[in-house]
Image: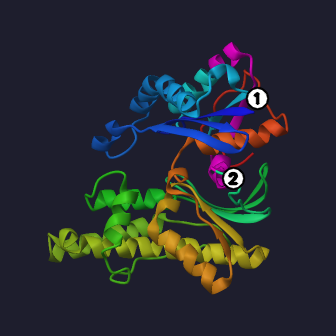
Amino acid sequence: MYILGIESSCDDTSAAVLNDNILLSNVTASQDVHFEYGGVVPELASRAHQQNIVPVVSAALRRACITKEQLSAVAFTRGPGLMGSLLVGVSFTKGFARSLGIPMIDVNHLQGHVMAHFIKEKPEDTTPPFPFICLLVSGGNSQIVKVNAYNDMEVLGQTIDDAAGEAIDKCSKVMGLGYPGGPIIDRLARQGNPLAYKFAEPHIPGLDYSFSGLKTSFLYSLRKWIQDDPDFIEHHKNDLAASLEHTIVDILMKKLRLAVKQTGIKHVAVAGGVSANNGLRNAFRDHAKRYGWTIYIPKFSYTTDNAAMIGITGYYKFLDKDFCSIDKPAFSKVTFK
């Protein structure tokens, strides 16, 4: 079977084609218009999706060397995300699937990030066994998920306020480094001392996260240092970035270690946009050596929002004939079904 995946939850318009669970193409159009605003502007994002979705879908079909008439189903992100952006993908999918007479498959965006580990480029590619633990970290979500099956995911812990990716972006903005902050902080951190500065870490019981206190600690510390040296950030930006990254990774890994200890599951994956961070990836490799974990780290191209993860989730739902009726609307907020 051929599955077309469509992702439009934020500012990336993406389309992918899979032959069963083998990826044939994955095309993404990013939006540079948001850089000058220091964040995603929803109205501009939805307009860009309208311009991009037809060319992106056409390119994905062309690169997969198939025609739209060969498609068995269309999988699409129904939520969560920016409502205006989602509506473009949802509306396109409804018209496209209806015109071809093929079923639609709605996909939870967060479920898609976890299922990115099941994308195969070759039949022999390995995938995690069920159950496994997944640390899902992005600009909008920080969760520890127990994955019992593709359609059975239990949230063990999640952020009670800000997400890890949001904290990184906000701290980057405070330093005047630009948007998006994740890649900038990651690049600078490789050249800095991660132990140069200490910032407040939250003491939240259980497996939940909190990053709002860290942002406040970072801001107040900068204000104090800038009073003594107005050029403090420029002189110490590498060490600041490295120390910030080290603190966030430490917070994430402490709770993840606790989750592994409580569940006894040592197959551990990471997913979401922040999983592209080198500090977090290195921490996973270190924990694999120290604690005997079997780890699963996605390719960089599958960490950010992409249609391949929507397509692979759609493939498994197709096998169960779990289709979506045309009257189902997009939704902006939810965790897992």
Magenta stretch? 94-121
Q: Is residue 43 above or below residue 125?
A: above
Looking at the picture, how far across and down is residue 135, in whole percent? 62, 64
Describe the element under mark 1 as helix, strand or loop: loop
* 1 vs 2, front mark: 2
Looking at the picture, how far across and down is residue 212, in whole percent? 47, 63
Q: Is residue 97 rendered magenta in the image?
A: yes
Residue behind mark 1: 324
In what quadrant of the picture does the C terminus appear? Answer: top right
* Main SS of residues in magenta: helix
Confirm whether residue 202 shows in the render. no
**Observer-nearest of 273 and 1:** 1
Q: Is residue 147 above or below residue 310?
A: below
Q: Amino acid at mark 2?
A: Phe
Q: Residue 118 shows which numbered tag? A: 2
Q: Residue at x 78, y 73 (%)?
A: 263
